[in-house]
Amino acid sequence: MQAGHLHSPASSPETPEPDASDNGIPAVSPRIPGGEVREEALRKSEDRLRATIEAALDCIIGIDEQGRVVEFNPAAEATFGYRKREALGRTLADLIIPERLREAHAAGMHRYLETGERHYLGRRVEMTAMRSDGSEFPVELAIEVAEGPEGRIFIGYLRDITERRRSVEDRIRLESQLRQAQKMEAIGQLTGGIAHDFNNMLTSIMGYLTMARERTEHYGDARLAKYLDRAERSGQRARDLIAQMLTFSRGQRGEPRALQLGPHLAEAMRLLTSILPSSVEIRSEFARKIPCVQLDPLHVEQVLMNLCINARDAMEGKGTLTLALQPVHGGACVCASCHQPVKGAFVELAVGDTGPGIAPEVLDRIFEPFFSTKEVGKGSGMGLAVVHGIVHEYGGHILVDTAPGLGATVRVWFPAWFPDTPDADGPDSGPDSHDATAAPAGLHGRVLLAEDEASVREFMQDLLGSWGLAVVSAENGVEACERFAADPTGFDLVVLDQTMPRMTGLEAAAQLLKHRPDAPVILYTGHSEHLTQERIRGAGIRAQARKPLDVPAFRALVEELLPARQTR
């Protein structure tokens, strides 16, 4: 065959001419023109972009230069309450921007289009958006600009941050509660420590005043007796203030019992006339059926008196004071002093006044001890702090309603108590008072005294000695145990301070009673936190006394515990 008769592959009518640049590989498919390939790739790219936008968890909203919506993804539909077909073509300002913010939005758009100033572009900012029902909510927004065939497109990425804001607010509130609790605990510990030291000083001061007043009866010096009486009254006021400090710090436990608050408050109201001027009108609003509470009646009176004095001072002695008592149920409210949520059934004691109200800047501090808006010397700042201590001691809470110029109402909530039987104590007459006149000397016996505070130890030696008792003193519990162990039957009475270095009074009593179980022991203290009657009796201690000592009551206690042959 001749070579000219052969058809070369390059000349075949069914095969395209090879391109030298691709080593014989066809540049274009013979079945798909080049434009169709580009369109297919573009379509696939658009489909991927559309799927990404529709699957996004954040709202993606696009607007043109006229502010009209050109993109509105499913997340935006769910967040704002519009269907996509409802949103497209509408202006963004009318759709999701609150009316008060639309002018600023329009100004920002205009400024960017005129000057290119990118104030918000490329940044994450927080703003307020609006749903289809008109409700507003916080969003995080980021805006970018894209150039399109029809001009610039503004793409907004929005995220509803309502839950984030709520979480932040909850965290801030919990941190505030923690700080408040820590602050009140620290102040309480400091207050209790200060009160303990003052009690020691007052024990000797008031004790010596009592002993001095006894001696004036023999000399008949009326003027000296008057001076001593005045000094003793001042000491009693100091003692009462210390008692309030200890109550705030939860160092003094009450003796709760089942109470009907109505009769107790009715009785206490009679005492209000002594602390309230006639220019203050008293109104009472007591509900008919009120559950019982478990409280110490003396603490109830203390709460009432402190609240009424506070209201009197707020009104500057002129106005209307309202007392109300009713059952309530805790719900969506928070205690004003401990900042904890309040839940459960309570009995509310409310004291309202017609004074100027409580300023917002001091509302969070009114329960702090020694905080007062009064002039120096016109208030100790302990009234509401004591109320805080007592109320929370019994598991209660405090709410405050106030507004500038509209007075204030302090609402104390005590937990309601529903006993198996309906019986509850009526009005109490309070503890028996002791005769202020000390009994004459006439005691015999040997007393072991343990007291670490030198001034109190000296006073107790003088006091017991003035009654005819021989006193052996020790500076701490360890020394007292050593002296007792050396002669267990040589002591007729043991008097132990509770708070001492190296060994507490309770620990010392336990050691002493191992040597002689029937030894009469008196424990005395001014800081009785965690000391219950069960714990004291369980330790074998016969009796307890509180600092500063009530001398006649302490004398009666000593007489009771000494063997009968040693008193006359």
Image (cartoon, rainbow, N blue to C red):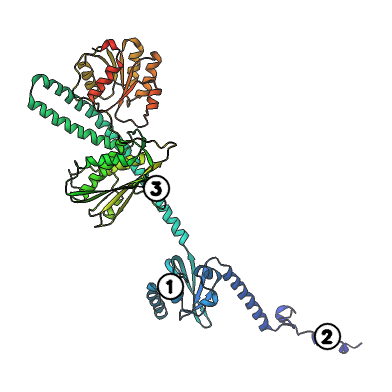
Query: What residue is pinned by disc 2?
Result: 8
Q: Position of residue 63 (x, y in %)?
A: 49, 77
Considering only vertical position in the picture, is 80 above or below 265? below
Q: Amino acid at mark 2?
A: Ser
Quick one: 435 or 259, which is closer to the camera?
Answer: 259
Going from N to C along the chain, the mark reached first, 2 or 3, is: 2
Quick one: 541 or 26, which is closer to the camera?
Answer: 541
Q: Amino acid at mark 3?
A: Gln
Residue at 34 percent of width and 10 percent of height: 489
Quadrant of the drawing holding the N terminus: bottom right
Residue 373 appears in the picture as rendered: no
Residue at 34 percent of width and 44 percent of height: 183
Query: What residue is pinned by disc 3?
Result: 340
Q: Position of residue 197 (x, y in %)?
A: 26, 31
Q: Position of residue 335 (x, y in %)?
A: 36, 48
Q: CA distance from mark 1 to mark 2?
A: 73 Å
Q: CA distance from mark 1 to mark 3?
A: 37 Å
What SS does tag 2 mark? loop
Q: Between tags 2 and 3, which lies in front?
A: 3
> Is 114 on the left or on the right of 472, as rendered?
right
Residue at 30 percent of width and 34 percent of height: 428
Determine which of the numbered discs, if any, sits on residue 97 in the image: 1
Quick one: 113 or 140, which is closer to the camera?
Answer: 140
- Image quadrant where residue 522 sits: top left
Q: CA distance from mark 2 to mark 3?
A: 96 Å
